[in-house]
Image (spheres, rainbow, N blue to C red):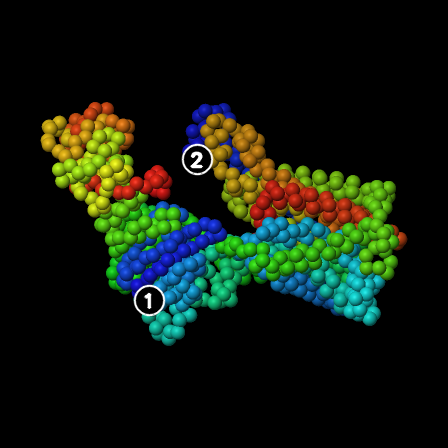
Amino acid sequence: MTQSTATAAPLKAKRSNPRQMGTAIGYAVLAATLVALVLFLVLPVSTILYKAFRAQGHFSLDYFRLLFANDLQTTAIYNSLLIGVAATLLCTVLSLPLAVINARYEFPGKKLLTGLLLTPMVMPPFVGAIGFQRFFARRGSVNLLLLKLGLIDSPIEWLEGGRVFWAVVALEVLHLYPIVYLNLTAALANIDPSLEEMATTLGVPRWRQFKDIVWPLARSGYFAGAIIVFIWALTDLGTPLLVGFQETMPVRIFNMITDVNENPVGYALVCLVILITFAVYLLAKTSTRGKSYDMMSRGHVSSAVKKISAVSAAPFYLLLVATIAAALLPHISVLITSLSSKWFMTVLPEQYTLDYYKQILHTDLPLIGIKNSLLFSGSSMLIDLLLGAMIAYVVVRKLIPFAGLLDALTMVPLALPGIVLAFGYVTTYTNTILDPFTNPTALLIIAYAVRRLPYMVRSAAAGLAQTSIALEEAAATFGASRFYTLRTITVPLVSANLIAGCLLCFAYAMLDVSDSLILAMKDRYYPLTKAIYALFLEQGSGEFVASALGVVGMALLTVCILGASLMLGKKMGELFRSG
Amino acid sequence: MEVTFDHVSKKYGDVLAVEDLNLKIAEGSLHFLLGPSGCGKTTTLRLLAGLESTTSGRILFGGKDVTSLPAAERGIGMVFQNYALWPHMTVAKNIDYGLGLKRLSRVQREQRLQEALELTQLTRLADRLPGQLSGGQQQRVALARALAIRPTVLLLDEPLSNLDAQLRLEMRDNISRIHRQTKITTVYVTHDQKEALSMGTEVSVLRAGRLIQSAPPRQLYHHPETPFIARFIGETNLVHATYRGDDDGHHLFECGFGHLLTKRPKQVLSPGQAVTLSFRPETISVQVDGAARPSVNPLRLVLEHLTYLGESEQLALRTSDQQILRANIFNPPEHDLQEGTVVVCNVDPEHILVLPVEHDLSSGT
């Protein structure tokens, strides 16, 4: 590397040394990232911590005392933790066989089915909850169907009492299992099949092979996904809010936001979420420390994938189709709701209509929501593209010492729950130029950008890592400057990854729930998701228009994600890892 | 343990990976399965190991049919091409893991572990993780792990292919030594003919799923049964020729650049029959001093190219019908042979092999 720059130097003596130039770029990007992260990550979080531990001008644990003295709050904390644990466990149970099937077997239609398995990830559980609720209402389709079949005598209250807890868990699991599934599949596929074959020749039973060999090697991959699932389920605001499960931490926080200055217990609650998140990451990191092993594959690796016929794959089809159907059920129910015209006391609507879609175009709120979301998401995507691509370049090409630190820094937002960040923005930037109560546009764009930055960095880094530095050096030997090389060689080569990153950032910003719900306080600044929520709360046809708007959002998201996965291929799974 | 393949075939879908294999592997031998990639040698080994099931035929271990026996009950020890070391277990744990499944006392287990470590000179490295070892050390761990369970048959799948040239030579000696010490029947898969020739007690050459010839190294080199083997084991000149009959105790063959006389071959030939003649580069003698000597097969060839290698010289010689023959001169005397000039050569009839015609001579090497 140094050789090539040395030979290039005499050719263009006047031009500054490319190596120094690279270092300069490196530090500039580092500085920009640091400023952005300090202002919009560190500051909000530390403000919360500061306020949570400070009463009457000095350090105090009063708010925590108040928090834990309140039964309503402790129940909410307990419920949320339980949702997190239950969702993670169920995701694991569901994903393990799916991952084994994907990593170890080849059968007709596998590509399509395993692809469809990922669809719930791109469907916001928040929207699915609307349809889910209709299906499981007292006079909803499920009860009516069961009554009709004579399986029950009186309707079951699915969404009352303890059952609402399981409704939330079910929705979380159906939304989040792909994250565990993707990570497990990658971990399993990474294990050289000869490691198990060797054990087979020694007579090690299958279950012991799994326990002694497969699991230790797949563990860190599994944890990387499981942590994200736990944190997401723990801090998801949209689902419990729409299903009407008030006794959860995120909903409590959401309700406290408007009067946080009168009731500082909110700080303590958010602080608790931060502590739990931090603790879980720490726990996972220590339990997998030094436990990540490079597979020492050398030369020829025999394929682990076993080809089986469609007939012998029958149980696999059953499991895959059942999972996909269950995962899509909430979304199908949203679709049906949005199309239904007469739907009263029947399993499925008696008549269908496109009226609610027409209403979207003729009502203010949905149009404002779509317009705002396009603007906010688009802007945040551009910020991510610029910053993320630069960060990835600096990190992958190691332009500065401690490039790994920069990488770690940009991954922090992935770990930080959206609800914490939004809450922090409100407390930090109220009564400043960015005050969300007057105009949340800037903060919403920033919140979207900060939280999706990791996707962009990962996506761009994946592309850059595959693009040999020799290609850039070759250009440098002809006297091309670093910027010229970037523009003509590097960017074109990683464009697919950049576009994929953009699509992901855009799509996830479009359907962001916690930031949107918390930061947008006035009608005219409502993004799509808050508009859906507001419509859902409206009497009359609100629920139906909300469903229609939800379907529009899902369609948008699907197109973006499909595009991204086409461009990223198998690399897609790497975006949803915590470590 | 004597190993027998009895009409064994293996099909993957429509692809025949191993076709009607009949082979006896003698007890205590170091038997090589040699062939170019894709010839079915690794599949054959995996059939032996029980990692693949046969499509038809039987596999016998010392007279006992093991065809349907699972891998664990065959008493084999296997070394995989990529070693397949468990990266999360230390060297000792890797070796001990298999022992833990045998009915052994704690003392026996420890003893077997130490034995295996000593045999492969790994005692010092027992507490390391595989990731902390060099390629050669990893290879030895794989060997120790396979040996520790005291297999009746040891299976090695290209064990040296991931090592650099120097280490490969060392490990050849190592494996030969261990084989001499343990006398375990060993089946060794490789595509490297030098490995097979230098180490094997017997070598089976496979091509496209079929066994072509099975013989001790010397016999394989000096008496290959097909042109493919002649080319695959060492270097040779292959010449299409037609049998023209007897001439003064020799067989007379007509080829594109004249006539060649050979010693009487084993097989019975009829005049007009097409054959392939094979003679090694070192069997062509080149007259460097220009003095005419009587010879049986004098050839006037154009010296196309000469490569000087110190202890030897390699010559590329062009025949009148534009074929290139290769000749090696060992300990070459001083001479002034010029490229582009005609040189007089001689091929000793003793060393010309008469082989059947093989279709598609160019492929499979």
Does residue A513 appear in the picture of this structure? yes
User: Which mark identifies residue B63?
Assistant: 1
- Residue A503 lies, with reference to residue B210, above or below; the image says above
| Disc 2, SS | helix
State which chain disc 1 sits on.
B
Residue A117 image offset from top left, x and y in percent: 64, 53
Viewer-closest of B344 and A27: B344
Quadrant location of the N terminus of chain B?
A: bottom left
Mark 1 belongs to which amino acid? Gly
The residue under the point 54% across, 43% down is A395
The residue under the point 70% across, 46% down is A558
Viewer-closest of A419 and B90: B90
Residue situated furthest bottom in the rendering: B105
- The number of discs equals 2
User: Which mark identifies residue A2?
Assistant: 2
| Disc 1, SS | loop
The 10 Å Cα crowd at callout 1, few under 14, some 14 to 19, many 20 or more, is few
Residue A144 image offset from top left, x and y in percent: 82, 63
State which chain disc 2 sits on.
A
Write down the quadrant of residue B287 in the picture.
Answer: top left
Mark 2 belongs to which amino acid? Thr
Viewer-closest of B92 and A309: A309
- Residue B66 lies, with reference to residue A129, above or below; the image says below
- Residue B81 lies, with reference to residue A20, above or below; the image says below
Q: Are marks 1 and 2 in contact (CB under 8 Å)?
A: no
The residue under the point 63% across, 52% down is A113
